Each structure stands twice: as C-alpha cells, then as structure tokens.
Image (cartoon, grey):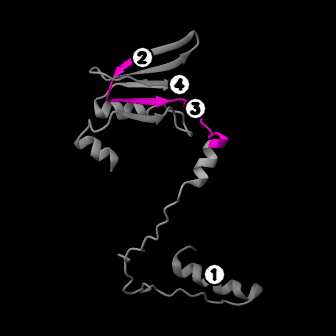
C-alpha cells in the first residue's frame, strides 16, 4: 500500500531509507529498483547521513571505500540504502532514567472492534467412498489377485 501511495504522489517523502542487501541472496537490488521506479536519486552502502537545510535542501551521504570515505551531496527527495552499524544507539543517562520514571503514563483500554467475519455453515464435501477388499490370506489369495490383474488388463 505504501508503494501505491508513492506511485500516486511520488514526492510525499524526503528520504526513503532501506537496508543495503537482503539476508538470503545479497542481491543489492531493492533500493536501486525502488529509486528507479520513483524517479529519484539513490546512494547505496551508506555509513553516514547529514541532512542540510536551506533552499537547496540536500543531504550528504558518506560511504566507506578501500581508500577512505566517499561523500555524495544529493538533492532530496532521495532513496538511500544503509550498511549495518549506521545507527549507534544512545543510552539514557542515570538522571535521564530517574526523570523518565517520574513521568506519568497514560493508560488506555481500547475496545475490541466488532468481528467482520461470520461462519454461516461448514459442509463436508461429498466424496466417493473407497474401500479395500480382502482377497484371502497368504498363498490362497494369489488366484484372486491374478484374476483382478486380468480384469484391469495388467496380465
């Protein structure tokens, strides 16, 4: 549904951030294909992001290479794929945790919506009954088996 919204109005976003590669095949394709579909610039393998302001409204993306770091200044909106480790979590300080414990918590009790599905009936489909016929026990069943093979055209 999000892609449909983007197709209807492809500039309702400033920045689309995606993972760099898939976990199964490492194809590196999704970000590039989405950017192409949206008609927006793309930068892949990003390890740093800085959003600029002002009339040009650009973003600077850093991507590591063997010789150092490449920087790309890209106008927004844009699509970017990021590498693992881009976001380093910030842990709250002890005073921050104490202040957070004192904040009131608003508790809500949402009502369960009315069910929209209703089972009216359950019918077991009519099937042709299959049964097994006992032709005999041991060697005495052999003539009956030969007769059935003759009837079905195997012998």
Q: Dot 4, crowdedness within 10 Å: few (<14), some or many (≥20)?
A: some
Task: Determine which residue is flagged by label 1.
Answer: 146
Badge 1, how many Cα within 10 Å: few under 14, some, many 20+?
Answer: few
Q: Are marks 4 and 2 in contact (CB under 8 Å)?
A: no
Sequence-wise, the earlier of marks 3 and 4 is 4
**Residue picked out by circle 3:** 84
Sequence-first disc among 4 and 1: 4
Helix, strand or loop status at disc 3:
loop
* Viewer-nearest residue: 105 or 56: 105
Q: Please give the residue where the numbered disc 4 appears in the rendered image.
A: 47
Q: Position of residue 14 (x, y in %)?
A: 33, 33
Residue 126 in the image, given as x and y percentages of width and height: 42, 86
Task: Indicate the secondary structure of the residue bearing disc 4.
Answer: loop
Which residue is situated farthest in the top direction here?
67
Residue under label 2: 72
Query: First in sequence: mark 4 or mark 2?
Result: 4
């Amino acid at each position: 549904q999000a892609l449909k919204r983007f197709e209807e109005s492809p500039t309702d976003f400033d920045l689309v951030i995606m993972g760099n590669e898939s976990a199964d095949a490492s194809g590196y394709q999704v970000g590039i294909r989405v950017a192409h579909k949206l008609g927006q610039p793309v930068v892949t393998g990003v390890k740093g992001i800085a959003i600029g302001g002002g009339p040009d409204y650009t973003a600077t993306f850093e991507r590591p290479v063997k010789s150092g770091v490449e920087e790309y200044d890209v106008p927004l909106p844009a699509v970017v794929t990021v590498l693992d480790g881009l976001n380093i979590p910030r842990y709250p300080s002890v005073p921050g945790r104490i202040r957070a414990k004192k904040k009131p918590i608003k508790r809500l009790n949402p009502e369960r919506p009315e069910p929209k599905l209703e089972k009216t009936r359950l019918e077991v489909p009519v099937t042709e009954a299959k049964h097994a016929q006992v032709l005999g026990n041991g060697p005495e069943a052999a003539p009956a088996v030969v007769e059935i093979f003759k009837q079905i055209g195997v012998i």
